[in-house]
Image (cartoon, rainbow, N blue to C red):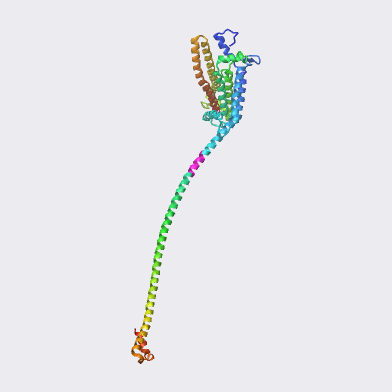
Amino acid sequence: MDITFTLIAQALTFAILIWFTAKFIWPPLMSAIENRQKTIADGLAAGERGKHDLDLAAKRSAELLREAKEKAADILASGDKRASEIIEAAKLQAKVEADRIIAGATAEIEQETFRAREQLRSQVSAIALAGAGKILGREIDASAHNDLLDKLVAEM
Amino acid sequence: MSTEHALTPSSYITHHLTFNSQSIGSGGFWSLHMDTLIVSGILGLITFGLLYWIVSGVTAGVPSKRQAAVELLVEFIDDQVKGIFHGDRNKFIAPLALTVFVWVLMMNAMDFLPIDVMAWVYENVFGQSHWRAVPTSDINTTFALALSVWFLMIFFSIKVKGLGGWIHELFCAPFGSNPLIWPANFLFNLIEYVSKPLSHALRLFGNMYAGEIIFLLLGMWAATGLVGTFFGALLGAGWAVFHILIVVLQAFIFMMLTVVYLAMAHESH
């Protein structure tokens, strides 16, 4: 139980151990621990950020999808409208064309009728002349009665 | 146990409680307890060498198991210090706390070695008839630590507050700066400065010494016959288990008091 020089020697040992720990053991270990803590904190923050980005991307894609659907609906609607317009226009054009064809045909028919009548008339006059000539024989001079016959033809 | 002496209870205890003392001069003070010095020195070398070996391969990435174990210890100490000391603890206080805890723990843990088996080993393997293996049951060790802390305490007091601030605090704290109560303040501080290293050193010493004594008493009982052997072994086992708690607890308390004293030295009143 006696205090001896051992005390001084032990204090010296203690001092050396403190110095050794403070210089060679504590700092490298602490810096490693702190580095790892920082890495973990950064990783957590990055994860959080990634999650946030994912949320944003999901929101953005939903938005895009909605826009695309709207656009598609618009396109469909305008397509329908355009189709009905084209159909209307085609109907109109067809009608005009038909009218034109009918008018043309009518005109042609009239012309044909007219021509046929003319022909008929001239043939009738010729037949009438021939008939009259046959009936009257030589009594009737074609040149002397041409005026009369022409008048008859014009009346027909 | 030396065979040339008759084995009596008193010789048994005296044998186990005698230091391996080497005189280095005249007078009782000038001697060295070789057992205390060598055991504590070897323990210091082994533990701090081991720590150094592990720390030299330290990585900030995924730690190895041994690094994780050391980190667990270091973070435990760091947490304790953080709660008490508010300042740059990494420079000195926390490494000091680690040193104190680990070294005292290892020295205390020498108490786990079975005393009589080890006495035989010291005697027949190392040729030492007297060898006390628990450095912290030597009052020189505990006072060496406590007084070192005490000097550090005064050093930090003066460093933080200045010499004038420290002397001012000696006379003006804790009761106030009225000149009439200067003596009371000074007396109070004096008692505090005396009682701190005393209680610090004697608490650890007393616990470890008492632990050793109880092992010795149980050993003596075990030598008295079959019943004594049975109960000696049973109680010895029980005390050894309880001692695991004491060893760790006393190392922890010693470290905490060290940190508390040094933290108090940093605070101004």
Q: In this picture, is A122 found above or below A22?
A: below
Relative side of A77 to A41, left or right: left
Which residue in the rendered view is the most extreme toward the right?
B25
Relative side of A115 to B18, left or right: left
The residue under the point 38% across, 68% down is A95
Residue B27 in which image quadrant = top right
Task: Give the magenta range.
Answer: A44-53
> Magenta stretch: dominant SS?
helix
Looking at the picture, how far across and down is residue B195, in whole percent?
54, 21
Foreground: A154 or B218?
A154
Which residue in the rendered view is the most extreme toward the left?
A135
Q: In this picture, is B169 found above or below B113?
A: below
Would you say residue A40 is visible in this rendering?
yes
Looking at the picture, how far across and down is residue B129, in whole percent?
61, 13
Would you say residue B162 is visible in this rendering?
no
Magenta stretch: includes residue A52: yes
The residue under the point 54% across, 35% down is A37
Question: Can you say which quadrant of the picture contains the C terminus of chain A?
Answer: bottom left
Magenta stretch: includes residue A77: no
Looking at the picture, how far across and down is residue A40, in whole percent?
53, 36
The residue under the point 48% across, 42% down is A51
Foreground: A4 or B182?
A4
Residue A18 in which image quadrant = top right
